[in-house]
Amino acid sequence: MRAVVVDIEGTTSPTDAVHGQLFADARDQLAGWVAAHHDEPDVAAALDAARQEAGLPAGAPLDAVVAALTRWIDEDVKATPLKTIEGRIWAEGFAVGRLDAHFFADVAPALRRWSDDGVHLAVFSSGATSVQRPWFGAAADGDLTSIVTEFFDTVNAGPKQDAASYERIAATVGARWSTTPDQLLFLSDVPGELDAAAAAGWQTVGVRRPGEPQASTDFGAHPTVTSFAGIAVLPAEAAAR
């Protein structure tokens, strides 16, 4: 392999850490934050996109948009405008110390081992890149953004269960790291995401974390592990020798 790309929720981090902390924070902060930032260009664009996706009329009042966004949070809808706004809220939360990050104990040692072996590391999550970076920067045993250097979400890559999204990521990292799709490994707890990555020519491993929602899911032909410690990544240069 030349690169490993990881999902976050249920893969590197407990689902409860996302739902229990981040989602609750976004819900609590949403109305006040939107009122304070609605006229900023990126926020205004996200709110307009939310109006359209929610079937609201153009120019619908902020309270109607906030109600739709709140419903999406409660239903865990992976809507891009919601993820954009959540990302901004959470980035602020990390900056002021309102939030902290949580990782499974095996994640940081594995990432550092792979990086030391010359493997590039990236993230592909439905959460906005604006929160992915501070999340990996706030790891309890040290900032991981020095080794995890590329971040992809549904805005800059596309839907996570669409093979075209993985083709876009492969093109981006291929240009930067001289990789081909078959030298990319995707780790996720969602079989549909692994199917899409495999369709784009990637290698895949399903992550079946005990106690997580996907622990008993059928991963089909994808090999599975319960811990990153169970994955041996052989760098492409070593494989060639």
Image (cartoon, grey):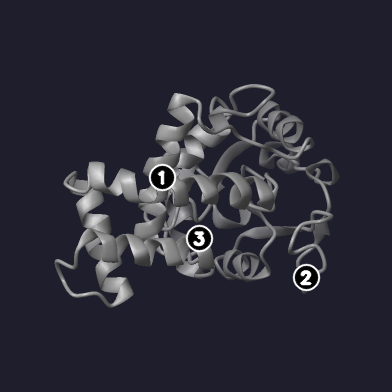
Direction from residue 221 to residue 164 in the image, left or right: left
Q: In the image, residue 91 lies at what x, y percent? A: 42, 36
Relative to 4, does residue 56 appear above or below in the rendering? below
Q: Residue 29 got which mark?
A: 1
Q: Residue furthest bottom?
A: 55
Pick the residue in front: 181 or 87.
Answer: 87
In 3D space, how far apart are the residues under numbered discs 1 and 2 (Cα atoms)?
33 Å
Q: Badge 3 local density, few (<14 within 10 Å), some, or many (20+)?
A: many
Pick the residue in front: 62 or 51.
Answer: 62
The reply to whether callout 1 and callout 3 are in contact (CB within 8 Å) is no
Residue for badge 3: 166
Relative to 88, does residue 219 appear above or below in the rendering? below
Instruction: Name the element at disc 2.
Output: loop
* Kind of residue at disc 3: Tyr
* Kind of residue at disc 2: Thr
In 3D space, how far apart are the residues under numbered discs 1 and 3 (Cα atoms)?
32 Å
Question: In the rendered image, is residue 236 in sight?
Answer: yes
Q: Quadrant of the N terminus?
A: top right
In this view, the mark in front (1 or 3)? 1
Q: Residue 217 got which mark?
A: 2
Instruction: Name the element at disc 3.
Output: helix
Query: Which residue is painted at 19% across and 63% down in the image?
Result: 61
In 3D space, how far apart are the residues under numbered discs 3 and 2 (Cα atoms)?
22 Å
Q: Badge 1 local density, few (<14 within 10 Å), some, or many (20+)?
A: some
Relative to 207, does residue 146 appear above or below in the rendering? above
The reply to whether callout 1 and callout 2 are in contact (CB within 8 Å) is no
Across the whole image, how many numbered discs are drawn on residues? 3
Relative to 40, does residue 92 appear above or below in the rendering? above
